[in-house]
Image: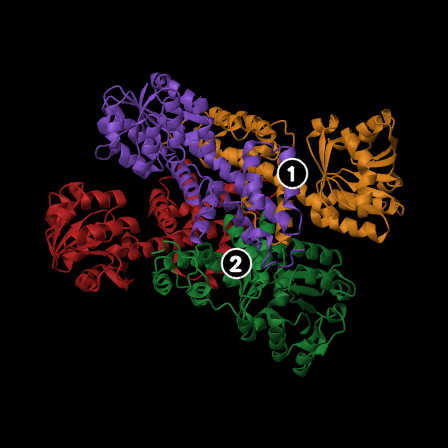
Chain colours: A orange, B purple, C green, D red
Amino acid sequence: MRIGFIGLGNMGREMARNLVRAGHELTVYNRSRGSSEALAKDGAMIAEHPAEAAGHEVVITMLADDNAVESVVLGERGVIEGMQRGTLHISMSTISPNLSQRLAAAHEERGQEYLAAPVFGRPEAAAAAKLFIVAAGPKHALAKAKPVFEVVGQRTFEIDERPEHANLVKLLGNFMITCVMESLGEAFAVARKPKVDPRIVFDVLSSTLFGAPVYNTYGPKILEEQFSPAGFKMPLGFKDTRLVLQAAEELSAPMPFANIVRDRYLSAIANGYSDLDWSAISMGAAQSAGLAFGGDESHSDAAD
Amino acid sequence: MRIGFIGLGNMGREMARNLVRAGHELTVYNRSRGSSEALAKDGAMIAEHPAEAAGHEVVITMLADDNAVESVVLGERGVIEGMQRGTLHISMSTISPNLSQRLAAAHEERGQEYLAAPVFGRPEAAAAAKLFIVAAGPKHALAKAKPVFEVVGQRTFEIDERPEHANLVKLLGNFMITCVMESLGEAFAVARKPKVDPRIVFDVLSSTLFGAPVYNTYGPKILEEQFSPAGFKMPLGFKDTRLVLQAAEELSAPMPFANIVRDRYLSAIANGYSDLDWSAISMGAAQSAGLAFGGDESHSDAAD
Amino acid sequence: MRIGFIGLGNMGREMARNLVRAGHELTVYNRSRGSSEALAKDGAMIAEHPAEAAGHEVVITMLADDNAVESVVLGERGVIEGMQRGTLHISMSTISPNLSQRLAAAHEERGQEYLAAPVFGRPEAAAAAKLFIVAAGPKHALAKAKPVFEVVGQRTFEIDERPEHANLVKLLGNFMITCVMESLGEAFAVARKPKVDPRIVFDVLSSTLFGAPVYNTYGPKILEEQFSPAGFKMPLGFKDTRLVLQAAEELSAPMPFANIVRDRYLSAIANGYSDLDWSAISMGAAQSAGLAFGGDESHSDAAD
Amino acid sequence: MRIGFIGLGNMGREMARNLVRAGHELTVYNRSRGSSEALAKDGAMIAEHPAEAAGHEVVITMLADDNAVESVVLGERGVIEGMQRGTLHISMSTISPNLSQRLAAAHEERGQEYLAAPVFGRPEAAAAAKLFIVAAGPKHALAKAKPVFEVVGQRTFEIDERPEHANLVKLLGNFMITCVMESLGEAFAVARKPKVDPRIVFDVLSSTLFGAPVYNTYGPKILEEQFSPAGFKMPLGFKDTRLVLQAAEELSAPMPFANIVRDRYLSAIANGYSDLDWSAISMGAAQSAGLAFGGDESHSDAAD
């Protein structure tokens, strides 16, 4: 299949490489040309602007946030301009349901097809083609996208016919992850105060009811305070929390847990921790309990 | 071994039965005599008061809450009175670290041994001897208790030498469970507002990062709103949330997620839902989003 | 002075009328022409579009929200188009600091002057020229606006030279008001449960430390549950809470009280209370305590 | 009147002195004898234990917390022992409704009379006989206490016949005060981030809707960060917040604002601020926004 691919960050470049290797004819575009050239060595062609990459059967966008997607798709020489009637745009970025809905409308107006298909998985999973894809949109578009999904992911979940619903589900998934971080952060902080080893607490949890990848991934990071280098940085975690709250707000649905997570991000960012992994919000509970990073209890009151 | 067993509720009676079947010589005590008689058929002897059941090598208490334990252990003709120097009390109830610490002191004063060993598991797990035991106390006492733990549980986690630490870890475990309930409740409520099927949201979660028993147990209950008959009732969930907050308060550790969970329990109880399963607090998010039980959206605003 | 006045809602029409009566030469514009005609009887001229009203020494906008201001000022035949170099736009609406900053930049680019001067006060205060004005912007612009402020308000607070700071202060003021509503709501709910008369609680408060207009205005409304007709509707209270949280978010400042207030608004709106006065969020605490509107305690548990 | 007075702390000694000066015959008791001797110079007699002070027509207790009251009243040689049938105990301490109810029952059993009459006011107000008294209990007991109240306070609010209701109202009043502190803390923190002078924010508030003593007392303290010497220390503020939450919990009433205030206290205490005035919880919002004490912005991110 002839595919345009826009956005060659940590995730996008791995997905694009897998598509090239699977024999698809790829035209790539990235704001900074360096990443494109790396892929050209694997056999991809390089487009000079988004519209050029969009002149194919399928164009995929994998970008950082709403602003990036909005300007690449709707901006000058953007995806919408480059697409033809009947061709398909698969938006795989984590964006707001609101923007996704606007993209759907803009494409529909021009007789273009549109799917939202955000993914779960870190760059390693992208490289290993082990992403989980959450897709929504018209059935025939989903059928057309199948060969793409089969190359980049290990499984596709089809939500329903409304693209923005895939974006909502993706945000809810990230919300669930942040709840795990915060709950572990609180539990470990309480354990540490009277010197109960939080590693034992985690062992109890993960050996009994909590033996899921999300705990196994983040539990040890939080226990060992390994937040650097960041797999996914604070401001990105914040962005997704903001988006889920915004989406919920538009639906008149309060999310008290998300409020607390949002404030953890704000406070971490305000206090200079922007470069840490998003799971470092778990340290908020420790700090408010007078526990310092690294287990060195600076202000411990009558903790024992 | 000659064992006294006090408290034959849903959990206790299964544990006691397993001990009898394993060949231990059991003397049981329960406030209402009916439960004792059922066990007598299995070969247990019946004590007339807690002190009588406590006159053995080991005495186990498995009671509903702090008040019950306090009166059975420290009250007239209580456990402490009946025990001899050197005999062991294993407190398996979910009680406050504070009370556990007081029990430890009271036993120590009399040269008696004391372990806290609360458990994770529902009555079915107790019947199947599949409980997880969280134990803490002096090493020799832990060694002495081993044959008991091997009969009633599938695995024992030894925390450290301070009994009250086992109680704290147990409360933290229950706190983690309530966080799962609330986070699922919020995610499902947000999904339902624009008519995204929450079953698909749950499928995405449990098939990817959240495939742990705690999600697999509570996710479907919450999705199907099957809160009756209750496995563990609202007021018990509330009690444990109150206890973890109280313990954290004594340690000067804020737990913002626990605050929210506590308020869900208070609100559920205040509004007449005391007989439902403790996981019904997940409906709080739905109600505050204008969604009614049973999916019938009574007050839906511009939800679609 | 020749003044353009755009936005003749509950507040704007009273302010405009006071300006006409004070002898200023007013040209008014309102989306629906009816309100303009009422003012024409008082001597105002009617403009056909915002740009026409903006062709004067000073143009005032008093509109409902960010969207209205954005379209009226920056849209086609908007204020910016109609203004000349050196003329002054006074934005008196309650809008986001973010939009205010963008308006400031747009005006500056064209050599036009800009002040933000939102007000505190209900329509009655506007009619009585008793508004409190919170103004910010360049000093000479503040000087030029003085005659306007003296006609419509009882006092002007000059914040500093950055217009968006006035908008921020206005939002913080409304935030403070909502905190009073919520705190009264919680206190009254707790009092009502054991049948302590909340009127006495309010009497104690207002006779001792809390004798300020904000308590005297909202306390009785909340006590008597007089939320209809609304002086300021739910969705407007929600809007301002959203704006203050958004502004704080952009400044990386968590506002936990504002989160709770926001969720009260969302829940009230989701449950069908949009037509009530914004102070009805105080009923959220009562409902979550199992108390019904009107004092009829529907689900009271062991309240006594 | 012959009056026993127990508890000569900052508040109690001023109240006792006023009673002596008004001509009442006082017998005082204080745990540390020094304070009693100071009052003896004013003409008071000194009791050797609480029971001795309680052998009069009226005995007043003014102590630090539940524990102190419980031991002084119900303990050995306590108030209850010393009182005769028909004599009156006026409990003026800020204690839990729960304890107050237990005291009422204990007195009733012995045919003794009991009133709860906690007060609003700082030591200066106590010295000036300007306290506000919140009293509840049987009408004839209230009548008997009137001469006492007239000497120590400027006004008495009679709640109803159940003593514990006065304690609840007192706790609700303190809760309202802490809400003012937190809301000011949040508003000032948000203002400070873009360098809006929080003094102007406060001026706007106090000159318009918020001109009440509670704002005028705490606003300037918070603005100037004058938290030392403490008028009322952190742990006392925490205690009262804990008590109001406990009372509300027993009544099944959630108090989300109180949760946030409680966590501010816990965090302040855990981080070593126990010696500051209780209003220093307002700094929590500043710290979580990356603002340091004293206005020196240590970690400011893109705040401007």
- Circle 1 sits on which residue? B203
Q: Which residue is nearer to you in this view: B259 or D146?
A: B259
Q: Secondary structure at mark 1?
A: helix
- Circle 2 sits on which residue? C173
Hey, which quadrant is residue A301 in on the image?
Answer: top left
From the image, state whether disc 2 or disc 1 is nearer to you: 1
Residue C257 position within the rendered picture, expressed as x and y whole percent measured from the top left = 50, 51
The residue lying furthest to the bottom in this view is C41
Q: Chain of mark 2?
A: C
Residue C273 position within the rendered picture, expressed as x and y whole percent measured from the top left = 55, 63
Give the quadrant of the C terminus of chain B.
bottom right
In the displayed structure, B116 sits above or below D284; it is above
The type of residue carrying mark 1 is: Asp
Please give the label number shown on residue C174: none
In the rendered structure, the answer to whether residue A292 lies left or right of residue C270 reads left
Residue at point 55%, 58% (across, down) = C268
Residue B262 position within the rendered picture, expressed as x and y whole percent measured from the top left = 45, 44
Residue C124 position within the rendered picture, expressed as x and y whole percent measured from the top left = 53, 73
Q: Are marks 2 and 1 in contact (CB under 8 Å)?
A: no
In the displayed structure, D131 sits above or below B57; it is below
Does residue A48 show up? yes
